[in-house]
Image (tube, rainbow, N blue to C red):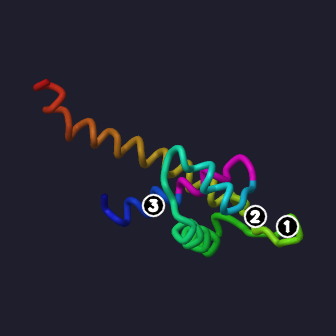
């Protein structure tokens, strides 16, 4: 898979993981595991990139005597998810066109 496409897909997956509630790294990995394998190092790289792009914010909460970073999606992050859904409809339309002959010949 094209690296830029995969990168964009992973970004949207991470945003979707915090769409309904703020979360922290380990929980995001656990929540996404049934759908996609993501290493901690990859996740934290994505989180830093999304924070720099103002698609999420970060805050800390004490938990068990330690500080835990929580991530909160911003309006820009929510808009990115909506943009992705619209873009994906177009990608699926292109896919149907490309595979049309295969379906017709089956």
Q: How far apart are marks 3 and 1 (CA)?
A: 29 Å
Q: If you read the primary sequence from the N terminus, does the residue marked by circle 1 or circle 2 appear first? A: 1
Q: Are marks 1 and 2 in contact (CB under 8 Å)?
A: yes
Which mark is in front, 2 or 3? 2
* SS assignment at label 3: helix
Do tag 3 and tag 1 residues touch (Cβ < 8 Å)?
A: no
**3D distance between C-alphas at marks 2 and 3:** 22 Å
Of residues 39 and 45, the one nearer the viewer is 39
- Residue 28 locus on image (x, y percent): 64, 55
Q: Characterize the local packing of mark 3: few (<14), some (14-19) or many (20 or more) Cα atoms within 10 angstroms.
A: few
Q: What stretch is highlighted in magenta?
A: 12-21
- Residue at x-position 32% and y-position 39%: 93
Residue 58 image position (x, y, % from top left):
74, 69
Please tell me how crowded label 2 is: few (under 14), some (14-19), or many (20+) other residues with Cα within 10 Å: some
- Specify the principal SS of the magenta part: helix
Residue 2 lies in the magenta-colored region: no
In the figure, is residue 44 to the left or right of 83?
right
Residue that mark 1 sits on: 61
Residue with the mark numbered 3: 8
């Amino acid at each position: 898979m094209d690296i830029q496409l995969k990168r964009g897909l992973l970004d949207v997956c991470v945003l979707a993981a915090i769409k309904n509630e703020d979360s922290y790294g380990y929980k995001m990995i656990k929540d996404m595991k049934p759908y996609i394998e993501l290493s901690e190092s990859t996740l934290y790289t994505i989180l830093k990139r999304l924070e720099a792009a103002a698609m999420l914010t970060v805050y800390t909460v004490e938990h068990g005597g330690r500080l835990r970073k929580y991530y909160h999606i911003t309006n820009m992050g929510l808009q990115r998810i909506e943009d992705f859904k619209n873009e994906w409809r177009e990608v699926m339309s292109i896919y149907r066109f490309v595979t049309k002959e295969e379906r017709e010949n089956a």
